[in-house]
């Protein structure tokens, strides 16, 4: 809290200032002079604490800064007026002497009020960040140029007023001391008084400028940080609207822009997701698989990715914040290339001939080529990159015996390795026209037997670690539940998971 510092400075400054500008105050003892200021400012501080609690702290954000400014200024001015009355009553001082005290206290109150109002503004910004409750900016706000103009003029007037009083008092002093003081002594005394007063005003002015530039720096830092995040696609932040001026308006416009971009982006993402599922479902309708297959496999992929994201061999791909989400979104397009396979082959209930099998295998390359065309048209992005990777490589095998590229080991993209296991597992547990559904235990046995040959050993270990999640996903998105919009009950899931 900066208030105690201002009040302490007021006691020290006024105790010295009073004796320099007013011969009547100078006639008091040091104890009388200092005691009057200590008592007055201590009472002022006590009154301030009470008024801040009932008049400032409970007020809406929009008026708190202004109330602090007015409260502090009038408390200082009021203390000066109270001291004037006290000296008139107790010591029969003229009103002119008291007005000098009022001017001094009002000058100090002016700078203290601005500094404490700026401190309140910083506090409100912290509250806005914590609660998200912004100030409402009035369209008819007082412009910043006007505020700076008033501050500059007030600084000049207060300094000139106090300096005038000091010079006027020193002229009377020079006349009264006559030849008892040398010119050099008089010069040193007057210069010391002027230096003290100007130094006090200069320190307060610099302090206000420092406080204001600090608030401005914080605002610009928030503004730049939010804009930088928005330029990278992160639209979740906001600039705290902490002042009713041009900068508050700038913050409002920035937040409105971010909100508009967020709504537009959400709409685009929803459209993209619907398009993905529509395309993927189109591919599935031409196959012997159901639409639930794409829902299950994308969730298998996500479960494996979440388990492996800290694994040293996978962290480079799965560690970045959005990559798992992008994998999840792009997984449904893994078999999009089947759209290009003739029905006679795609829907054949029996075993495919070697020639037909080669044609069937071409769906991986067909899907990747289609997505590559999309990348060419729309520009490369992470989503299309993952979608193309998965479409092309989800039939590759760890030992190099897969297709279409015969890749092996770590040369197979991480996305393809995850989808390879997810796709095979779902094919095993699902009923098809050419086979009955296998149990989870049988599917697990087949996958374990393919460890190091068909599947990445680390991916198999991840599958074994989270197989309960696979069972739950299969139950929640079973072909029957998908067709009837039925969600299995928790007891049923637990039975399926062996819990």
Image (cartoon, rainbow, N blue to C red):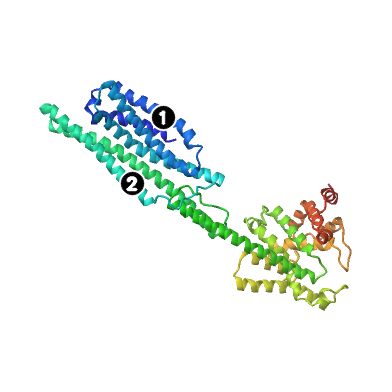
- The correct choice, above or below, for 132 with respect to 452 in the image is above
Image x and y of residue 458, in percent: 73, 56
**Residue 336 percent coordinates (x, y):** 73, 70
- What distance separates the C-alpha of mark 1 from that of mark 2? 26 Å
Image coordinates of residue 493 in percent, x first then y, are: 83, 51
* Residue hosting label 2: 150
Compare residues 29 and 435 and report the one nearer the observer. Answer: 29
Q: Is residue 389 visible?
A: no
Would you say the residues marked 1 and 2 are in contact, meaning their CB atoms lie under 8 Å apart? no
Is 400 placed above or below 443 here? below
| 383 lies above or below 176 | below
Q: Position of residue 480 (x, y in %)?
A: 84, 60
In the rendered structure, find residue 234 and report the number of the disc placed on it: none
Which mark is drawn over residue 45?
1
Residue at 43 percent across and 29 percent down: it is 47
Residue at 43 percent across and 31 percent down: it is 48
Element marked by disc 1: helix
| Element on which disc 2 rests | helix
Mark 1 vs mark 2: which is more N-terminal? Answer: 1
Quadrant housing the N terminus: top left
Q: Measuring 69% from the left and 67% from the top, which residue is drawn there?
A: 275
Q: Residues within 10 Å of mark 1 (few under 14, many from 20)?
A: some
- Is residue 108 found left or right of 60 in the rendered image? left
Residue 204 occupies which quadrant of the picture? top left
Could you tell me which residue is drawn at 25 percent across and 38 percent down?
Answer: 161
Give the camera-side residue of 312 and 236.
236
Q: Foreground: 498 or 442? A: 498
Q: Is residue 319 visible?
A: yes
């Amino acid at each position: 809290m900066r208030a105690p510092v201002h009040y302490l400075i007021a006691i020290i400054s006024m105790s010295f200032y009073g004796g320099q500008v007013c011969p009547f105050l100078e006639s008091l003892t040091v104890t009388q002079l200092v005691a009057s200021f200590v008592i007055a400012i201590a009472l002022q501080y006590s009154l301030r604490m009470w008024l801040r609690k009932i008049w400032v702290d409970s007020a809406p954000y929009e008026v708190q800064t202004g109330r602090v400014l007015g409260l502090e200024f009038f408390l200082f001015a009021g203390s000066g007026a109270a001291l004037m009355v006290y000296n008139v009553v107790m010591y029969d001082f003229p009103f002119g002497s008291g007005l000098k005290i009022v001017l001094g206290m009002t000058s100090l109150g002016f700078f203290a009020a601005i500094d404490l109002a700026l401190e309140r503004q910083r506090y409100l910004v912290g509250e806005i960040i914590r609660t998200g409750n912004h100030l409402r900016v009035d369209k008819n706000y007082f412009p910043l140029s006007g505020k700076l103009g008033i501050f500059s003029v007030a600084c000049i007037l207060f300094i000139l007023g106090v300096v005038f009083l000091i010079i006027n008092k020193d002229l009377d002093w020079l006349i009264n001391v006559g030849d008892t003081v040398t010119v050099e002594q008089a010069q040193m005394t007057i210069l010391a008084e002027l230096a003290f007063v100007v130094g006090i005003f200069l320190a307060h002015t610099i302090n206000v400028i420092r406080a204001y530039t600090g608030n401005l720096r914080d605002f610009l830092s928030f503004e730049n940080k939010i804009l930088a995040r928005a330029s990278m696609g992160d639209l979740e932040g906001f600039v705290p609207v902490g002042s009713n001026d041009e900068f508050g308006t700038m913050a409002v416009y920035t937040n409105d822009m971010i909100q508009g971009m967020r709504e537009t982006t959400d709409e685009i993402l929803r459209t993209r997701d619907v398009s993905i599922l529509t395309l993927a479902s189109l591919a599935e309708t031409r196959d012997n698989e159901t639409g639930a297959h794409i829902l299950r496999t994308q969730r298998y992929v996500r479960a494996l990715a979440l388990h492996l994201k800290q694994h040293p061999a996978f962290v480079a791909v799965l560690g970045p914040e959005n990559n798992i989400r992008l994998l999840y979104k792009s997984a449904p397009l893994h078999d999009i290339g089947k759209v290009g396979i003739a029905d006679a082959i795609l829907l054949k209930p029996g075993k495919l001939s070697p020639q037909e099998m080669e044609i069937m295998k071409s769906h991986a390359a067909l899907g990747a080529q289609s997505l590559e065309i999309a990348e060419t048209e729309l520009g490369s992005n992470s989503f299309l990159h993952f979608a193309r990777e998965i479409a092309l490589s989800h039939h590759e095998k760890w030992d190099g015996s897969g297709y279409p590229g015969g890749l092996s080991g770590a040369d197979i993209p991480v996305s393809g390795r995850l989808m390879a296991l997810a796709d095979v597992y779902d094919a095993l547990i699902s009923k098809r026209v050419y086979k009955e559904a296998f149990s989870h235990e049988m599917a697990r046995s087949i996958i374990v037997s393919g460890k190091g040959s068909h599947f990445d050993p680390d991916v198999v270990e991840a599958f074994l670690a989270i197989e309960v999640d696979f069972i739950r996903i299969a139950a929640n998105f079973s072909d029957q539940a998908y067709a009837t919009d039925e969600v299995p009950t928790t007891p049923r899931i637990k039975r399926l998971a062996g819990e």
